[in-house]
Amino acid sequence: MSKRLIHRRAVIQGLASSAGLMLSGCAETVPPTYGNLLRMGDLLTYKAHRLLLPAQALAREYERSDISAAAAIGTINPGNSAERAFNTEHGPVYERIFGDKFANWRLTVEGSVARPGAFSLEDMKRMPSRTQITRHTCEEGWSAIAEWTGVPLRTVLEACGIKPSARFIQFYAYDNGVGSIDMIDALHPQTILAYGMNGRDLPMGHGAPVRLRLETQLGAKSRKFLRRIVVLDEHDADTFQQIDRGWAWYMGI
Ligand SMILES: Nc1nc2c(c(=O)[nH]1)N[C@H]1C(S)=C(S)[C@@H](COP(=O)(O)O)O[C@H]1N2
Ligand SMILES: [Mo]
């Protein structure tokens, strides 16, 4: 991997002492937790990263020999009604599309785009791909290194003609719970819609047929089992519902 790349950890480590400066800066994109005193940490981390990190700074990439065993965590089968986040509407749909090897799966892209789209797995595999070996860090305190292959989210968004007013990308899966990210992370070169893991099709437990890989934030933000992407100008009710459950919105690393 090129030595010229800027690494995120190196930049972040130099920042800690200047956190006070960030209070006065006013980023125009704010987390949905903005104004919530109990979630000031979310806002401070977000502002520190956004003001001081080069937007495209890369997460470290590893060698094939570094790949480790990775447990499938959280939902591992959205079609199973015993799953904690089972969705009564979309769970049964997942079971059907898994049954026909995802031939009828489509990822829809809608919202603030000029050309809303519906992409099949074949469509996505025909687009330019990126492969990266990265470390997944779960907020619960474990990490694992794997190789991920997919299409840059940026490529898909550009194919749909993203509108200038767009500020957030929100992801919906076949289980419950949405995830949204800002445009800086959405356009980051390592942010991919992954359909491959360690040289094979993405296994069910890890989010088949397609999951988000967001290397700039903790593992929980890399939503698995994607079905729908909505481009937003503002946070919406689904965004706020996600943080009502006590999660931080920004989990930057
Ligand atoms: N749709 C969906 N995406 C999800 C989850 C989930 O339960 N459902 N769990 C998250 C969490 S907390 C982690 S750590 C990773 C786990 O990814 P893995 O199963 O590939 O290890 O997926 C994230 N994405
Ligand atoms: Mo996690």
Image (tube, grey):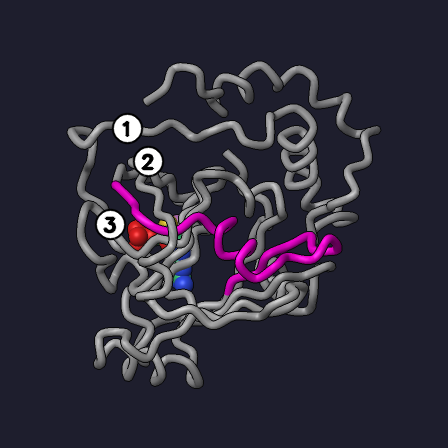
User: Magenta residues, as a range?
Assistant: 147-171
Crowd band around label 3 with a 10 angstrom C-alpha radius: few (<14), some (14–19), many (20+): some
Tell me the CA gap for discs 2 and 3.
11 Å
Measured Cα–Cα span from mark 3 to mark 1: 14 Å
Which residue is pictured at 59% across the width and 57% down the height?
169
| Residue lying at 75% horizontally and 49% vertically, measured from the top left | 36
Q: Which residue is mark 3?
A: 197
Q: Pick whichever of labels 2 and 3 is earlier in the sequence.
A: 2
Q: Is 152 included in the stretch rendered in magenta?
A: yes
Mark 1: few/some/many CA within 10 Å (<14, 14-19, 20+): some
Mark 2 residue crowding within 10 angstroms, few (<14) / some (14–19) / many (20+): many
Disc marking residue 236? none
**Quadrant position of ligand 1:** bottom left
Left or right: 34 in relation to 130: right
Callout 1 touching callout 2 (CB < 8 Å): yes
Question: Closest to the observer: 227 or 14?
Answer: 227
- Residue 115 in the magenta stretch? The answer is no
Q: What amino acid is found at the position of numbered circle 2 in the picture?
A: Thr
Q: Which residue is mark 1?
A: 62
SS class, disc 1: loop
Identify which amino acid the numbered label 1 is placed on. Tyr
Residue linked to disc 2: 134
For ligand 1, tell me if the residue under mark 3 lies within 8 Å: yes
Q: Is residue 37 left or right of residue 74?
A: right
